[in-house]
C-alpha cells in the first residue's frame, strides 16, 4: 500500500544524507578495524592498535567529510539523470499511446487548436487596442475636451477657435492645450506633381497640438506655434506610412517641396510609425490650421469645428479640469449671447476617446472566447477521465510493479501537457492566420495597425496552453491514479469508476451551463443586429454606385467650378446602365454635413433656441438617385442654378420640430440677410447611421452653395461594380487629372457602418454554435460511457421484460437531467450576461422572455439529440451477452 | 623489507594506482591499500586518507562503481569495481605516464 511517507517528498535529502553518512563511517570503521587486527597480530594491545590504526590512517574527520560530500554529489547527479530518463520515457510512452488512438488524439488536438487559436487571435487584438501604450508622452495625463450644450443635447460638441483660445488662456489646471480639425474624407489635400495625383488625408492642427501630445518627430520637427503664422504656414508633416509608401522612405524628405492643392508646401518632418492621431486608422499628413483662412473655415465664436486635447497639470484629475473649464465656459456664455447654451464642458481621458467605444465589446468577445476554451477543457478533461478509467488495469499493474503515485501522475500529466502544447502550437498557427483576416477587415477598429502576433501574444498562447493542459489533466490524473494505487487489479468494472462518473457528470453540467450563456449571447447579439439591419435608412442602398472626388482649385472661378461639377454629373449619367445620378457632399454614414442653426425668415426667435440642423449641398438629381421620397412641394430642378434665386429643401424631421402644423413650403429660411424660400419637404434620412435618430436637415443646391467635395450616387440597372470602369473612364474624359478618392457601392458603404455589430453577432453566433456542439458532445460522451458501464444493468432489465422504449427512456432521462441542471445554472449566468450586454446592443430592453425560451429550447433539443444515439445503443444490448461478460 | 623510507606519491598518481588495482579484481578499500603496498614493495607511501578520498572521487566521476557486501571476515564492506569509463581512463593515463617518463629519462640519462 502506498502510504504517504512525508520524508519521501520533503525529506528525502535528509534520509539519503543519513544513509550516506552512515555508509562512509562504516567503510572507514571497517578499514580501521582491519588495520587494528593486523597490528594486534603483530603484538599490539587492542587499545593501542586502534589508536595506531587511526594515526596511520591520516586525518579521519576530514576524509569522512570529503567522502560524504563526494557521495552526495554523486547521488544528486544520478537522480537528475534518472529524472531526465523518466521524462524521456514518459514522452515516448505518451506519443505511442496517442498514436494508438489517433481518433482521440485528433479530436483533442483539433478542439484545443480551435480554442487556443481563437483565444490567441482575440488576445492579439486586445493587446494592441487596450494594452499597448499610446504613442504619446505620458498618455495617461492627456484628455479630450468637448463643448456641451444641454439644451440641444450635444455632449461631445466641437469647439470654436475663440472659445479654444479663451480656455487655453484661462486654464490653470492644464499645462498645455492643442486644437485640431480632422474629418475623414473631408480634410484632404490633393498631391500633384510627384507621380500620380493622390488625395492625402490630412489633419489640420492648431496651436499647441504636437506640444500637448508630446510625441517627437522621427525626422525633422513637428508643427509648433511658429508655423501657425502667416507666411510660415505652408509646411507639412508626413505620417510614417505615407513617407514609406509614397516617398519610398526617402531619407532626404525633410526640406522637399510638395504641390498640394496647387500650392507649395515644405516637408518639415516625419512622424514615427503608428502615430496617426487624430485619425483612427490612417492619416497621410498634418498641416497648420491657419493654412485655411477664415473664408474657408469660419473663425467666429459660433463656428464650432475644432477638437481639443489637453495635458493635465501634475496632480490634477480630469474632474478638476472639467470643473475649472465649466466655470470658464459659463463665464464666456454670460458675456456672449451666442454661447448662452454652451455653458459647460466635458473632459474625458484621451485613451477612452480613442478606444472607449470598442473596449466593452472587445472584452465581451474575449470573455466569450475564453468560455469556449473552458468548455473545450471540460470536454477534454472528460475524455481523459474516460480514457484513464479505461486504463485502470494498466495503471494498477504499473503501480504493483513499483511505480509511485507521483510517477503515474507525472506520466498522465505528460500526456495532457503534450496534448495541450501541441494543440497550442497548432492554435498559434491558426491565430496567425485569423489575425491576418481580422486586420484585413474594414471594421474601423482603432489602433488596428498594431494588431499582430508579437512576443506578448505568443507568451499568452504558451501560458494558456500550459494552463489548459494542467487544468484538464490534473483532475483525471489524480483521480485515475488514486484508484490504481488503491485497488488490486481485477477484471471488470471496479467500484472506483463510480466516482469518475460523478465528476464527468459535473463537467457536463458545467459545459451545458456555459453553452447556455454563449447561446444567449448569440441570440441577443443576433437579434440586435437584425433589428439594426431592419432600420429604414430613408434611402435605397441597392444597386447604386458611389464615387467620391473633389473639385480641385484648378477650376478657380465660381463659374468654372460649377460647370465642371455639372459636366462630371452629366458624364456619369451618360454611361449606359446608369439610371439616375445625384451628388451630395457627405454621403449618409460618411459624414454629417455642416452643422448650423436654422433661422426662419420673418420670425424673431432667440439665437440659442434656434434648432440645430445639418446642412447638405446636393445636386438636382440627388433625391431621385437615392430614392428619397418627396413629401411636399418640389425637389431641385435644373432651374436652380448659380444665377437663380437660392432655394432650400428641408426634411420631415426639421418640419416636425420647427414647423409643427404648418406647411413649410410657405416659409423661408434666413441666411445672413438673404431670404431662402423652402420649396419642398423630403423624407428623413438616417445620415449618421441606423443607430442614430435622424437629424433635422436642410438641403441646399450645390450649384448655389458650392462645396468642392462630391459624393456621387449613380443608380444602376445592372450590378453597380460592373459599371465602375465605365464611370471612371467617363469622368476622366472630362478631366484626365481628376483624382478619384473612392469608388464602391452604396450597399458596401452602408454595410461598413454596421460592420461592428455584424462582427459581434457573427462571433457570438460562432461561439454559441461551438458551445452547443461541444456541450452536445459532452452529453453524448457521458451517456455513451454510462451505457457501457451499465451494460449489465440494462441487460438484466431487458431480460426481466423491460421494453426497448423503457431502456431508451432511462438513458434519455439521464441526459435531460444533466441538461436541465446545466440550463438552470446557465440561466443565472445568462441573466447576468444580458445586463452587461444591454448597454452595448441596439434597442435591447432587459429580460426578453421569448429569447430565453428560445435558448432553452435549442439547448434542450441538442441534449435530446445527443442522448438519442446512446439510447439506441442501450437497446441493442444483448441481455445474455451483457450478463455473461466480464 | 625496505631499507629506505617510502617515497611520497607524485600528484595525481593515487587515481591511476587505484584504477590499476581494480583492473585486476574488484576489492574493498583495505584490500586496495594492501595490494598496492605489496606490489610496490613498500616503496610508495599511499596515505589511507588520500586513498579513500580518491576512491570516492573516482566513484563520483563514474570511473568506478561500488556496492555493499559481506567481507571474508563476515563484516559489512564496500567493494569497488572498475567501470568501463574507468578502464578507458586507465589505459590513457598509463600510456601518458609511460611517455612522460620515457621522455624525462631521455633527458636525464643523457651522457
Image (cartoon, coloured by chain):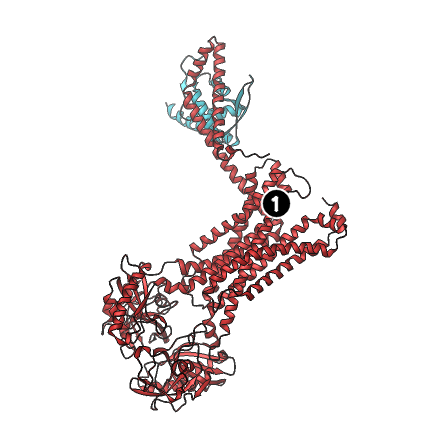
Chain colours: A red, B cyan
Asked whether B41 or A224 is in front, the reply is A224
Image point (76%, 50%), residue name? A799
Asked whether A379 or A556 is in front, the reply is A379
**Residue A54 horizontal/vertical position (percent):** 43, 16
**A395 in relation to A456, above or below:** above
**Residue A379 horizontal/vertical position (percent):** 57, 53
Secondary structure of residue under mark 1? helix
Q: Is residue A859 visible?
A: yes
Asked whether A86 or A115 is in front, the reply is A115
For residue B91, side relative to residue A334 (left or right):
right
Q: Residue furthest front?
A: A661
For residue A786, side relative to residue A26 (left or right):
right
Give the quadrant of residue A820: bottom right
Which image quarter is the C terminus of chain A in? Answer: top right
Image point (42%, 54%), residue name? A456
Q: Which residue carries the number 1 mark?
A: A499
**A448 in relation to A110, above or below:** below
**A88 in relation to A190, above or below:** above
Q: Chain of mark 1?
A: A
Give the quadrant of residue B5: top left
Which image quarter is the N terminus of chain A in? Answer: top right
Q: Is residue A208 visible?
A: no
**Residue A70 horizontal/vertical position (percent):** 45, 29
**Residue A173 horizontal/vertical position (percent):** 26, 61
Asked whether A639 or A708 is in front, the reply is A639
How many numbered circles are shown? 1
Query: Label 1: few (<14), some or many (≥20) within 10 Å?
Result: few
Amino acid at each position: 500500500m502506498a502510504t504517504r511517507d512525508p520524508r519521501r517528498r520533503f525529506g528525502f535529502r535528509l534520509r539519503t544524507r543519513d544513509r550516506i553518512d552512515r555508509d562512509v563511517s562504516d567503510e572507514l570503521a571497517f578499514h580501521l578495524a582491519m588495520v587494528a587486527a593486523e597490528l594486534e597480530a603483530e603484538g599490539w594491545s587492542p587499545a593501542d592498535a586502534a589508536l595506531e590504526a587511526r594515526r596511520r590512517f591520516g586525518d579521519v574527520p576530514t576524509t569522512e567529510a570529503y567522502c560524504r560530500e563526494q557521495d552526495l554529489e554523486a547521488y544528486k547527479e544520478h537522480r537528475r539523470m534518472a529524472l531526465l530518463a523518466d521524462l524521456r520515457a514518459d514522452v515516448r510512452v505518451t506519443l505511442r499511446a496517442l498514436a494508438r488512438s489517433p481518433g482521440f488524439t485528433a479530436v483533442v488536438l483539433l478542439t484545443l487548436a480551435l480554442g487556443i487559436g481563437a483565444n490567441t487571435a482575440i488576445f492579439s487584438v486586445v493587446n494592441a487596442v487596450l494594452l499597448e501604450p499610446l504613442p504619446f508622452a505620458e498618455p495617461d495625463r492627456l484628455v479630450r475636451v468637448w463643448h456641451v450644450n444641454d439644451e440641444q443635447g450635444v455632449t461631445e460638441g466641437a469647439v470654436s477657435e475663440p472659445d479654444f483660445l479663451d480656455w487655453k488662456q484661462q486654464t490653470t489646471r492644464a499645462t498645455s492645450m492643442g486644437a485640431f480639425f480632422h474629418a475623414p474624407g473631408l480634410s484632404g489635400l490633393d498631391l500633384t506633381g510627384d507621380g500620380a495625383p493622390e488625395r492625402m488625408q490630412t489633419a489640420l492642427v492648431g496651436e499647441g497640438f504636437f506640444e500637448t501630445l508630446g510625441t517627437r518627430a522621427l525626422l525633422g520637427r513637428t508643427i509648433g506655434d511658429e508655423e501657425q503664422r502667416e507666411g510660415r504656414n505652408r509646411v507639412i508633416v508626413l505620417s510614417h506610412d505615407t513617407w514609406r509608401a509614397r516617398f519610398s522612405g526617402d531619407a532626404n524628405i525633410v526640406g522637399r517641396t510638395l504641390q498640394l492643392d496647387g500650392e507649395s508646401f515644405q516637408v518639415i518632418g516625419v512622424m514615427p510609425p503608428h502615430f496617426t492621431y487624430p485619425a483612427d486608422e490612417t492619416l497621410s499628413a498634418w498641416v497648420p490650421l491657419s493654412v485655411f483662412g477664415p473664408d474657408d473655415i469660419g473663425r467666429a465664436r459660433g463656428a464650432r469645428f475644432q477638437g481639443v486635447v489637453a495635458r493635465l497639470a501634475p496632480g490634477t484629475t480630469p474632474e478638476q479640469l472639467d470643473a475649472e473649464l465649466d466655470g470658464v465656459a459659463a463665464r464666456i456664455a454670460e458675456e456672449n449671447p451666442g454661447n448662452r447654451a454652451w455653458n459647460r464642458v466635458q473632459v474625458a481621458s484621451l485613451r477612452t476617446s480613442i478606444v472607449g467605444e470598442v473596449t466593452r465589446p472587445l472584452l465581451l468577445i474575449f470573455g466569450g472566447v475564453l468560455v469556449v476554451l473552458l468548455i473545450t477543457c471540460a470536454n477534454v478533461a472528460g475524455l481523459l477521465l474516460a480514457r484513464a478509467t479505461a486504463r485502470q488495469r494498466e495503471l494498477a499493474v504499473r503501480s504493483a510493479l513499483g511505480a509511485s503515485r507521483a510517477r503515474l501522475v507525472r506520466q498522465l500529466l505528460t500526456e495532457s501537457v503534450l496534448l495541450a502544447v501541441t494543440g497550442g502550437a497548432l492554435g498559434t498557427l491558426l491565430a496567425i492566420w485569423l489575425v491576418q483576416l481580422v486586420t484585413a477587415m474594414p471594421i474601423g477598429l482603432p489602433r488596428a495597425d498594431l494588431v499582430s502576433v508579437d512576443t506578448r501574444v505568443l507568451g499568452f498562447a504558451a501560458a494558456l496552453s500550459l494552463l489548459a493542459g494542467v487544468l484538464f489533466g490534473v483532475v483525471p490524473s489524480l483521480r485515475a491514479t488514486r484508484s490504481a494505487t488503491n485497488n488490486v487489479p481485477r477484471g471488470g468494472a471496479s467500484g472506483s469508476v463510480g466516482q469518475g462518473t460523478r465528476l464527468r457528470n459535473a463537467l457536463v453540467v458545467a459545459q451545458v451551463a456555459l453553452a447556455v450563456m454563449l447561446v444567449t449571447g448569440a441570440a441577443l447579439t443576433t437579434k440586435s443586429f437584425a433589428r439594426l439591419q431592419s432600420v429604414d435608412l430613408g434611402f435605397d442602398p441597392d444597386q447604386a454606385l458611389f464615387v467620391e472626388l473633389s473639385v480641385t482649385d484648378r477650376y478657380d472661378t465660381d463659374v468654372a467650378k460649377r460647370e465642371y461639377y455639372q459636366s462630371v454629373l452629366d458624364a456619369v449619367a451618360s454611361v449606359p446602365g446608369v439610371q439616375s445620378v445625384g451628388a451630395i457632399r457627405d454621403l449618409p454614414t460618411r459624414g454629417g454635413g455642416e452643422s448650423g442653426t436654422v433661422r426662419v425668415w420673418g420670425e424673431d426667435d432667440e439665437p440659442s433656441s434656434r434648432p440645430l440642423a445639418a446642412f447638405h449641398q446636393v445636386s438636382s438629381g440627388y433625391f431621385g438617385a437615392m430614392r428619397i421620397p418627396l413629401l411636399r412641394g418640389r425637389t431641385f430642378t435644373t432651374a436652380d442654378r448659380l444665377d437663380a434665386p437660392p432655394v432650400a429643401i428641408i426634411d420631415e424631421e426639421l418640419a416636425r420640430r420647427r414647423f409643427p402644423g404648418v406647411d413649410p413650403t410657405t416659409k423661408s429660411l434666413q441666411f445672413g440677410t438673404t431670404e431662402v424660400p423652402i420649396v419642398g419637404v423630403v423624407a428623413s434620412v438616417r445620415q449618421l447611421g441606423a443607430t442614430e435618430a435622424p437629424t433635422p436637415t436642410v438641403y441646399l443646391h450645390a450649384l448655389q452653395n458650392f462645396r468642392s467635395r462630391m459624393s456621387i450616387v449613380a443608380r444602376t440597372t445592372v450590378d453597380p461594380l460592373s459599371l465602375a470602369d465605365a464611370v471612371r473612364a467617363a469622368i476622366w474624359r472630362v478631366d484626365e487629372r481628376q483624382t478619384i478618392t473612392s469608388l464602391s457601392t452604396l450597399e458596401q458603404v452602408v454595410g461598413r457602418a454596421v460592420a461592428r455589430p455584424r462582427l459581434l453577432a457573427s462571433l457570438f453566433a460562432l461561439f454559441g454554435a461551438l458551445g452547443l456542439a461541444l456541450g452536445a458532445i459532452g452529453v453524448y460522451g457521458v451517456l455513451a460511457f454510462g451505457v457501457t458501464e451499465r451494460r449489465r444493468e440494462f441487460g438484466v432489465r431487458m431480460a426481466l421484460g423491460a421494453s426497448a422504449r423503457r431502456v431508451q427512456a432511462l438513458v434519455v432521462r439521464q441526459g435531460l437531467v444533466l441538461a436541465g441542471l446545466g440550463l438552470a445554472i446557465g440561466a443565472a449566468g445568462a441573466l447576468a450576461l444580458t445586463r452587461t450586454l444591454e448597454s452595448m446592443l441596439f434597442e435591447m430592453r432587459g429580460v426578453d422572455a421569448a429569447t430565453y425560451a428560445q435558448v432553452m429550447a435549442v439547448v434542450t433539443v441538442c441534449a435530446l439529440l445527443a442522448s438519442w444515439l446512446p439510447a439506441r445503443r442501450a437497446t441493442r444490448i444483448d441481455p445474455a451477452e451483457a450478463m455473461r461478460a466480464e | 623489507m625496505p631499507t629506505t623510507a617510502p617515497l611520497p606519491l607524485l600528484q595525481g598518481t593515487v587515481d591511476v594506482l587505484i584504477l590499476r588495482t581494480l583492473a585486476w579484481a574488484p576489492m574493498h578499500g583495505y584490500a586496495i591499500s594492501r595490494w598496492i603496498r605489496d606490489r610496490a614493495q613498500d616503496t610508495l607511501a599511499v596515505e589511507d586518507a588520500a586513498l579513500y578520498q580518491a576512491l570516492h572521487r573516482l566513484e563520483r566521476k563514474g570511473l568506478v562503481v561500488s556496492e555493499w557486501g559481506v567481507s571474508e571476515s563476515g563484516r559489512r564492506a564496500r567493494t569497488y569495481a572498475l567501470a568501463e569509463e574507468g578502464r578507458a581512463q586507465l589505459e590513457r593515463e598509463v600510456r601518458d605516464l609511460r611517455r612522460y617518463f620515457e621522455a624525462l629519462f631521455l633527458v636525464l640519462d643523457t651522457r
